[in-house]
């Protein structure tokens, strides 16, 4: 039995699939890198709040485009600005210890979601809905998005190359990092901004609600197999790419929505890894 995905990629009618797959594979590199930091630092809930707050920026961009005539205000730009803004807000509050971490995370999370839905509901133009942004729509991935993914992804990779040692220090021991002269607040905020960028990269394909899964599940699996962070990043990126390609293959065969299908593939792999780990520990 041949591959439905490979057959579709060779068909000119499915050129959008090639664009989406390339975007997904490019994003996998970023997700593998940043996801490793997120899982190691244990800031998954912060990443979730950033992802959901991006909806507020998307909603405002759609409202500004269709109701205010701001045609240059692309929803991806709105998502980027909202994600970066929420990352800096959460990071500054956490660092200042002026509020409980879980409280500010919850406040930002629900505020972004509420604003996004509010703005989208104010758009009178038919065909504008929130579901494609919540759950993803592979048809929306454009050639322009590939350039966006490449640019933002390149920035994340560059930051990782330049500051990997600092990120490792703040992920494992902030006090030790301070003693070594590392600016913990700066690199903590930079890490959150990199997380925000990662969230925006696959929002078209996976959707805001589920994009956080690819940021956490591949590194969570890799942490059980890789001996160190560099290998964990490589394995996470590979797993992320595999989940995307497999999800697209299954989606074509079963005629299911591609975003949730990709996430279910990742979740199945994660729970399988948990079961295998449990059986191995019992057998010892």
Image (cartoon, rainbow, N blue to C red):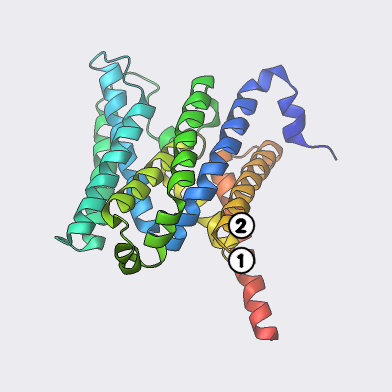
The answer to whether residue 136 is seen in the rendering is no
Quarter of the N terminus within the rendering: top right
- At x 51%, y 43%, the residue is 30
Inter-mark Cα distance, 1 to 2: 7 Å
Residue with the mark numbered 1: 227
Q: Position of residue 87 (x, y in %)?
A: 29, 46
From the viewer's side, name the closer residue of 114 and 182: 182
Q: State the SS at label 2.
A: helix
Q: Residue 179's image quarter?
A: bottom left
- Residue 231, labelled with which disc? 2
Above-or-below relation of 199 to 102: above
Q: Position of residue 43 (x, y in %)?
A: 37, 59
Quarter of the C terminus within the rendering: bottom right
Q: Position of residue 111 (x, y in %)?
A: 23, 45
From the viewer's side, name the closer residue of 248 and 232: 232
Which residue ends up furthest to the right in the rendered image? Answer: 1
- At x 56%, y 43%, the residue is 29
The answer to whether residue 151 is seen in the rendering is yes
- Residue 81, labelled with which disc? none
Q: Position of residue 25 (x, y in %)?
A: 60, 37
Label 2 near label 1: C-beta < 8 Å?
yes
Q: Residue 221's image quarter?
A: bottom right
- At x 57%, y 55%, the residue is 230
> How many marks can you see?
2
- At x 65%, y 84%, the residue is 282
Q: State the SS at label 1.
A: loop
Q: Residues within 10 Å of mark 1 (few under 14, many from 20)?
A: few
Which residue ends up furthest to the front in the rendered image? Answer: 180
From the viewer's side, name the closer residue of 222 and 6: 222
């Amino acid at each position: 039995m041949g591959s439905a995905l490979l057959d579709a990629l060779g068909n000119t009618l499915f050129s959008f699939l090639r664009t989406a797959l390339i975007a997904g594979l490019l994003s996998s590199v970023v997700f593998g890198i940043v996801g490793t930091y997120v899982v190691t630092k244990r800031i998954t809930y912060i990443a979730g709040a950033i992802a959901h707050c991006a909806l507020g920026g998307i909603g405002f961009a759609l409202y500004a485009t269709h109701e205010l005539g701001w045609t240059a205000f692309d929803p991806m730009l709105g998502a980027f600005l909202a994600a970066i803004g929420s990352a800096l807000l959460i990071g500054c509050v956490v660092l200042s210890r002026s509020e409980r971490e879980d409280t500010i995370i919850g406040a930002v999370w629900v505020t972004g979601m509420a604003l996004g839905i509010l703005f989208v509901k104010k758009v009178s133009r038919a065909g504008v809905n929130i579901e494609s942004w919540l759950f993803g729509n592979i048809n929306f991935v454009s050639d322009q998005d590939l350039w966006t993914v490449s640019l933002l992804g390149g920035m994340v990779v560059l930051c990782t190359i330049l500051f990997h040692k600092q990120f490792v220090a703040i992920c494992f021991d902030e006090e030790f990092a301070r003693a070594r002269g590392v600016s913990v607040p700066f690199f903590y905020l930079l890490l959150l901004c990199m997380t925000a960028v990662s969230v925006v990269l696959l929002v078209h394909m996976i959707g805001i609600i589920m994009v956080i899964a690819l940021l956490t599940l591949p590194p969570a699996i890799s942490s059980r197999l890789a001996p160190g962070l560099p290998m964990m990043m490589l394995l996470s990126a590979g797993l992320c790419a595999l989940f995307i390609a497999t999800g697209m293959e299954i989606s074509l065969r079963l005629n299911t929505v591609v975003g949730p299908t990709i996430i279910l593939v990742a979740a199945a792999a994660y729970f399988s890894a948990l079961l295998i780990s449990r059986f191995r520990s019992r057998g010892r």
